[in-house]
Image (tube, helix red, strand yellow):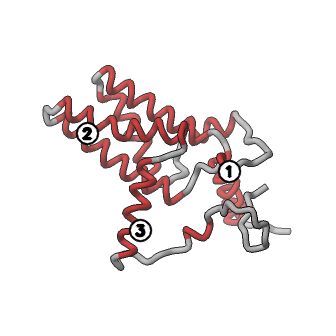
Amino acid sequence: MLTTTTDVSRSDRKDFDRVLEFGPGMRVQRLTEAAFMVAAIFTQDLRFAYVTLFLTVLQALSPRWVPVARLVARVVQIRPEKRIGDLYFDLDGVRGASAIAALVQALGIGLVWAGYTMSGFIVLTLPTASFLMAPTLGFCCGCWFYVLGRDWLTAHGWLRRGFDDIGDVAIARDDGPDQPKLPA
């Protein structure tokens, strides 16, 4: 059978998305971003915040541009058994959350540049808290704001509803054929 490079790249992309969904890479990515932000806040040195801003902008451009998660994916294999708590990665959610986080980080850095050091670092604690909560508690503040904004735009007719909600994993006791299953 002859396969084209597009088929191979789609297959590779799907495999990589699966590793991001079920592997520890994105959790380590978030903890790395949080570590740089905590270092920036405690040392009052924006160079650490620039690293996180760079990583966040990369993800806003493409949710697959996650250098730390890619490194972890090469080293750590994902578990064969799946649990509902393993679901972590959503392409649109990551892009939206990263765009929001990048804006908040830019605002905080801008405040520090403008001489409002205390206010700027207080603003930088917001994405830092989200970077810490996402891998530990499973709640991403940026994702929540993204979904809230998307739903608001849809409700006001400025955005058409897509098929993104159909792909959610249903948690129900009914094992009927219409219930989506976690991939094996």
Q: Position of residue 39 (x, y in %)?
A: 38, 24
Residue receiving disc 2: 108
Q: Residues within 10 Å of mark 2 (few under 14, many from 20)?
A: many
Q: Position of residue 23 (x, y in %)?
A: 67, 43
Residue that protrudes farthest toward the front in the picture:
173
- Which residue corresponds to the image point at 73% horizontal and 74% vertical from the top-left? 178
Left or right for 108, reference 4: left
Q: Residues within 10 Å of mark 3 (few under 14, many from 20)?
A: some
Q: Which comes sooner in the sequence, label 2 or label 3?
A: 2
* Picture quadrant of residue 108: top left
Q: Residues within 10 Å of mark 1 (few under 14, many from 20)?
A: few
Q: Residue 85 versus residue 29: which sits nearer the camera?
A: 85
Q: Disc 3 and disc 1: Cα gap in Å? A: 24 Å
Residue receiving disc 3: 151
Q: Residue 120 versus residue 77: which sits nearer the camera?
A: 120
* Picture quadrant of residue 70: top right
Which amino acid is tagged 3?
Asp
SS for callout 2: helix
SS for callout 3: helix
Residue that protrudes farthest toward the top in the picture:
43
Left or right for 71, reference 60: right
**Marks 2 and 3: which is nearer the front?**
3
Residue receiving disc 1: 84
Residue that protrudes farthest toward the right in the picture:
1
SS for callout 1: helix
Which amino acid is tagged 1?
Ile
Q: Disc 1 and disc 2: Cα gap in Å? A: 35 Å
**Marks 1 and 2: which is nearer the front?**
1
Q: Position of residue 105 (x, y in %)?
A: 31, 42
Left or right for 59, reference 1: left
